Amino acid sequence: MKKIALIGLVSLALYGCGNDKVTKEYLVGDWECKGIRFKSIMEDGKFSDYMDDGNIDYKWSLKLVNNQLNMFNTKSNKWEDINKFIDTYTGEVVFEDLDGAKMQFKGTVEKISEDEFNMEYEMIVNQNDIKHNYLDMKVKAKKTCTRIN
Protein backbone atom coordinates (compact mmCIF):
# COMPACT_ATOMS: atom_id res chain seq x y z
CA MET A 1 0.00 0.00 0.00
CA LYS A 2 2.87 2.38 0.81
CA LYS A 3 4.40 1.68 -2.63
CA ILE A 4 1.15 2.62 -4.37
CA ALA A 5 0.90 5.85 -2.37
CA LEU A 6 4.55 6.65 -3.11
CA ILE A 7 4.08 6.01 -6.84
CA GLY A 8 1.02 8.30 -6.78
CA LEU A 9 2.95 11.11 -5.07
CA VAL A 10 5.91 10.78 -7.45
CA SER A 11 3.56 10.83 -10.45
CA LEU A 12 1.84 13.94 -9.10
CA ALA A 13 5.21 15.63 -8.59
CA LEU A 14 6.39 14.73 -12.10
CA TYR A 15 3.23 15.67 -13.96
CA GLY A 16 1.92 18.42 -11.69
CA CYS A 17 -1.63 19.00 -10.66
CA GLY A 18 -2.27 22.25 -12.53
CA ASN A 19 -4.64 22.65 -15.44
CA ASP A 20 -2.41 23.21 -18.46
CA LYS A 21 -5.02 22.58 -21.13
CA VAL A 22 -5.92 25.44 -23.44
CA THR A 23 -9.70 25.74 -23.41
CA LYS A 24 -12.12 28.11 -25.10
CA GLU A 25 -12.65 29.83 -21.74
CA TYR A 26 -8.91 30.30 -21.28
CA LEU A 27 -8.60 31.99 -24.68
CA VAL A 28 -11.24 34.66 -23.97
CA GLY A 29 -9.63 38.09 -23.90
CA ASP A 30 -7.10 40.14 -25.82
CA TRP A 31 -3.81 38.60 -26.94
CA GLU A 32 -0.65 39.78 -28.66
CA CYS A 33 1.04 37.05 -30.70
CA LYS A 34 4.57 37.11 -32.08
CA GLY A 35 6.52 34.48 -33.92
CA ILE A 36 8.14 33.39 -37.13
CA ARG A 37 6.97 31.55 -40.24
CA PHE A 38 8.97 29.27 -42.53
CA LYS A 39 8.12 27.92 -45.97
CA SER A 40 9.31 25.17 -48.26
CA ILE A 41 8.47 24.87 -51.95
CA MET A 42 8.42 21.89 -54.29
CA GLU A 43 11.60 21.61 -56.36
CA ASP A 44 12.24 18.68 -58.70
CA GLY A 45 9.57 16.55 -57.04
CA LYS A 46 10.61 17.13 -53.42
CA PHE A 47 10.29 19.89 -50.87
CA SER A 48 13.20 22.29 -50.35
CA ASP A 49 14.63 23.00 -46.92
CA TYR A 50 12.58 25.44 -44.87
CA MET A 51 13.47 29.09 -45.39
CA ASP A 52 12.50 32.13 -43.35
CA ASP A 53 9.17 33.57 -44.51
CA GLY A 54 8.94 36.49 -42.10
CA ASN A 55 7.68 37.45 -38.71
CA ILE A 56 4.16 36.91 -37.43
CA ASP A 57 2.87 39.78 -35.29
CA TYR A 58 -0.82 40.34 -34.62
CA LYS A 59 -3.37 41.01 -31.89
CA TRP A 60 -6.38 38.82 -31.20
CA SER A 61 -9.61 39.64 -29.38
CA LEU A 62 -11.56 36.50 -28.49
CA LYS A 63 -14.90 35.96 -26.79
CA LEU A 64 -17.44 33.20 -26.21
CA VAL A 65 -20.93 33.45 -27.73
CA ASN A 66 -23.28 30.53 -27.06
CA ASN A 67 -20.23 28.41 -26.12
CA GLN A 68 -18.63 29.16 -29.52
CA LEU A 69 -15.21 30.84 -29.69
CA ASN A 70 -15.30 34.06 -31.72
CA MET A 71 -12.53 36.35 -32.96
CA PHE A 72 -12.89 39.99 -33.90
CA ASN A 73 -11.87 40.43 -37.54
CA THR A 74 -10.53 43.98 -37.96
CA LYS A 75 -10.86 43.80 -41.76
CA SER A 76 -14.58 42.98 -41.78
CA ASN A 77 -15.22 44.73 -38.44
CA LYS A 78 -17.21 41.66 -37.29
CA TRP A 79 -16.95 38.81 -34.81
CA GLU A 80 -16.30 35.48 -36.57
CA ASP A 81 -16.68 31.92 -35.28
CA ILE A 82 -13.27 30.24 -34.87
CA ASN A 83 -14.47 27.36 -32.70
CA LYS A 84 -12.65 24.97 -35.07
CA PHE A 85 -9.37 26.40 -33.72
CA ILE A 86 -9.49 24.23 -30.61
CA ASP A 87 -10.41 21.19 -32.72
CA THR A 88 -7.46 21.53 -35.13
CA TYR A 89 -4.63 22.35 -32.69
CA THR A 90 -4.62 18.90 -31.07
CA GLY A 91 -1.31 17.53 -32.33
CA GLU A 92 -3.21 15.20 -34.66
CA VAL A 93 -2.95 15.43 -38.45
CA VAL A 94 -6.05 16.90 -40.09
CA PHE A 95 -6.78 16.53 -43.81
CA GLU A 96 -8.96 18.93 -45.81
CA ASP A 97 -9.95 19.29 -49.43
CA LEU A 98 -9.49 22.93 -50.49
CA ASP A 99 -11.44 23.20 -53.73
CA GLY A 100 -9.12 21.01 -55.75
CA ALA A 101 -6.08 21.00 -53.48
CA LYS A 102 -5.33 18.73 -50.55
CA MET A 103 -4.18 20.18 -47.25
CA GLN A 104 -2.54 18.34 -44.39
CA PHE A 105 -2.39 20.30 -41.10
CA LYS A 106 -0.82 19.50 -37.73
CA GLY A 107 -0.94 22.07 -34.98
CA THR A 108 -0.30 22.20 -31.26
CA VAL A 109 -1.11 24.76 -28.62
CA GLU A 110 0.58 24.69 -25.22
CA LYS A 111 -0.35 26.71 -22.16
CA ILE A 112 2.72 28.30 -20.56
CA SER A 113 0.92 30.27 -17.85
CA GLU A 114 -2.46 31.89 -17.24
CA ASP A 115 -1.33 34.72 -19.52
CA GLU A 116 0.83 33.03 -22.16
CA PHE A 117 0.65 30.15 -24.62
CA ASN A 118 2.65 28.79 -27.56
CA MET A 119 1.25 27.71 -30.91
CA GLU A 120 2.99 25.70 -33.61
CA TYR A 121 1.73 24.31 -36.86
CA GLU A 122 2.89 22.69 -40.05
CA MET A 123 0.73 22.70 -43.16
CA ILE A 124 1.33 20.92 -46.45
CA VAL A 125 -0.71 21.89 -49.52
CA ASN A 126 -0.62 19.69 -52.61
CA GLN A 127 -1.99 21.03 -55.86
CA ASN A 128 -4.48 18.81 -57.68
CA ASP A 129 -5.87 21.34 -60.12
CA ILE A 130 -3.72 24.06 -61.67
CA LYS A 131 -6.71 26.32 -62.41
CA HIS A 132 -6.97 27.17 -58.70
CA ASN A 133 -3.36 28.42 -58.65
CA TYR A 134 -2.32 26.48 -55.54
CA LEU A 135 1.36 25.75 -55.16
CA ASP A 136 2.77 22.57 -53.67
CA MET A 137 4.24 23.97 -50.47
CA LYS A 138 4.87 23.44 -46.79
CA VAL A 139 4.48 26.16 -44.19
CA LYS A 140 5.58 26.00 -40.59
CA ALA A 141 5.05 28.59 -37.87
CA LYS A 142 5.93 29.04 -34.22
CA LYS A 143 4.44 31.84 -32.13
CA THR A 144 3.93 32.91 -28.54
CA CYS A 145 0.79 34.74 -27.47
CA THR A 146 0.62 36.94 -24.36
CA ARG A 147 -2.55 38.22 -22.71
CA ILE A 148 -2.74 42.03 -22.93
CA ASN A 149 -5.87 42.79 -20.88
Image (cartoon, rainbow, N blue to C red):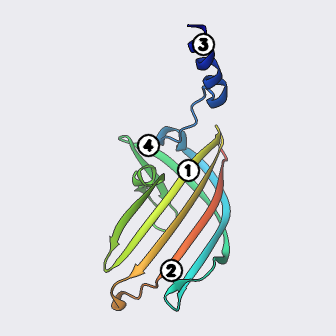
The label shown at residue 137 is: 2
Q: What residue type is labelled 1?
A: Val
Quadrant containing the N terminus is top right
Q: Which amino acid does label 4 sit on?
A: Leu
Q: Which of 118 and 59 is in front in this view?
A: 118
Residue carrying label 4: 64
The residue drawn where x is 54% and y is 61% is 121
Counting residues from the start of the chain, the first of labels 1 and 2 encountered is 1
Counting residues from the start of the chain, the first of labels 1 and 4 encountered is 4
Residue carrying label 3: 3
Cα gap from disc 3 to disc 2, whole angstroms: 53 Å
Q: In which quarter of the image is residue 8?
A: top right
Counting residues from the start of the chain, the first of labels 4 and 3 encountered is 3
Give yes or no for contact between labels 3 and 1 (Cβ–Cβ under 8 Å). no
**Badge 3 element:** helix
Indicate left or right for 66 with 26 as reference: left
Residue 4, compared with residue 68, is above or below; it is above
